[in-house]
Image (cartoon, coloured by chain):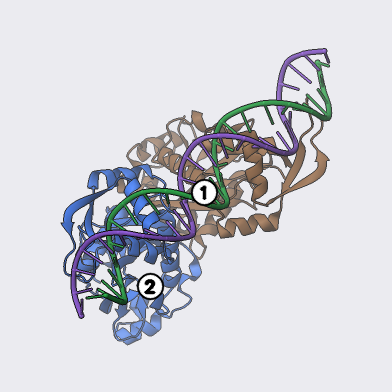
Chain colours: A brown, B blue, C green, D purple
Amino acid sequence: MDELKNYLPHISLDCTIFGFHDGQLKVLLLRWKGTEDWCLPGGRVLHGENLDDAAHRNLQERTGLSEIFLQQFYTFGDVERYKNYSFQETLAKLGLPIELGKEIITRDVSVGYYALVEFAEVTPSPDFFTEECRWWDIDQIPPLLFDHNDMVTLALKTLRRQLSYQPVGYNLLPTKFTMPDLQQLYETILGQSLDRRNFQKRMLGYDILERLEERKTGGAHKAPYLYRFDKEKYEKALKDEILFVG
Amino acid sequence: MDELKNYLPHISLDCTIFGFHDGQLKVLLLRWKGTEDWCLPGGRVLHGENLDDAAHRNLQERTGLSEIFLQQFYTFGDVERYKNYSFQETLAKLGLPIELGKEIITRDVSVGYYALVEFAEVTPSPDFFTEECRWWDIDQIPPLLFDHNDMVTLALKTLRRQLSYQPVGYNLLPTKFTMPDLQQLYETILGQSLDRRNFQKRMLGYDILERLEERKTGGAHKAPYLYRFDKEKYEKALKDEILFVG
DNA sequence: GCAAAAGTGTTTCGTCTACACCCATGT
DNA sequence: ACATGGGTGTAGACGAAACACTTTTGC
């Protein structure tokens, strides 16, 4: 807080952090101190800090992860972004001086990022303004502060579109995974079910997966093969924007 | 200049304005006073002004047009964005006091927009810092100031991708145009030639064009039909993101 | 009448979709 | 043995791509 002056004024960033667990797409949300108000994790940019670096720093602080797939998707610049919200009210709840409001209340242009992270690797941590940080199912997100519901919606829309020209999964799945795992991820993101056989054919056709000798043990029924992404080919596909399932 | 304080600090916007003329995709560039340095038209955001409104205001000032297709595509936030450039040098050329550099030189995060405009309707006008404003063929753009070449490249890439899920042309062509006109536009944006017959079939299939009785006269050879966009259906296609030619 | 551009329809090909059978494993 | 999920191949539907001939117009 005493370092407010180190940040660029009027610019903030907000991250929609997607995780995948139990067949559910999830988003990491924060709850403000002393309130029932939830919002997206966000932060500010230091003077002399790259915008992307600021986003990474922020993600690192909230999730503990440093290697993260992070994608800027839109910059929210409406003056009325805050219409859902009274800063004064919250400052009161937080027991902070109203004058502080002056510092924060000024209008921010916020750069929206979305991140894909491996659920199991994340250790959610609240920040200065918040006291709880946890995953929410994408379809059970409560009304959020500011324009954050819009941000989640647009982030998801962008992610879905991204699926049509770039591979996704490297950052959402554990290193080794089964084809059904990958399919479930796609189905969850797209919100629709896909044909098992066609899905497999397509995925293998992209030539970014490596099938391991190993099979997934322990589960009931026939043991599925394990796969891992061929990092090099995966990165190339990302870069080339190979056309994927739409 | 004396109104610098009215703008949000550390935030700017830059516009890649596409026009189409003589079978060439063109971009509107500005030349700084007393230099041979070209750059994209850009501007700043007023306190209390929506980001998009600021972009529209800027476009209006440079082109005289008020109804413009304008799309935000990326926010450039690297600290090193200015590495191509010495502000001091330019201030000297402009005959402005070096102290002013302090005001401007501070690092900006810039929101990139691209616009599609009807070439013939535009009246290019320089701004305070520049003395020339004119169209450049997309493939003859000189090295630009700052990271503006990157901006043009990404704008074009985004525009090309947009072509694959949204119709384009309403804002780049005159009200009445021929099918070959439209095809040439697509070919120019995509940088590849397309089959005449398939193109026509596809375009008509999207059901956003209205064929007029009228034909284009005056040209040599067989007179082509004139078409115009059905505004309502066009807008709907834009909104629904109907899948288009990729 | 000839060159150059525009209008139109059909066949071909490849891809995506739909679909069925066999196999492995735990209960 | 059986229920459940996983592995694999094929036939049909659809849409995209390739392609040719006729018509108009200016020179």
SS label for mark 2: helix
Q: Chain of mark 1?
A: A
Q: Which residue does the image show at 24% across and 69% down from the upper left?
A: B221
Along the line of sight, which residue is nearer the eye, A41 or B58? B58
The residue that mark 1 highlights is A162
Q: Amino acid at mark 1?
A: Gln
Placement of the C terminus of chain B among the 4 image quadrants: bottom left
The lab-note entry on whether marks 2 and 1 share a chain reads: no
Q: Amino acid at mark 2?
A: Ile
Residue B48 vs residue A30: left or right?
left
**Residue B138 has which mark?**
2
Q: Which residue does the image show at 64% across and 34% down from the upper left?
A: A196
Along the line of sight, which residue is nearer the eye, A83 or A156? A156
x and y percent of residue D21 in the render?
A: 36, 60
Q: Chain of mark 2?
A: B
Along the line of sight, which residue is nearer the eye, B241 or A142? B241
Res B107 visible: no
Residue C12 vs residue B222: left or right?
right
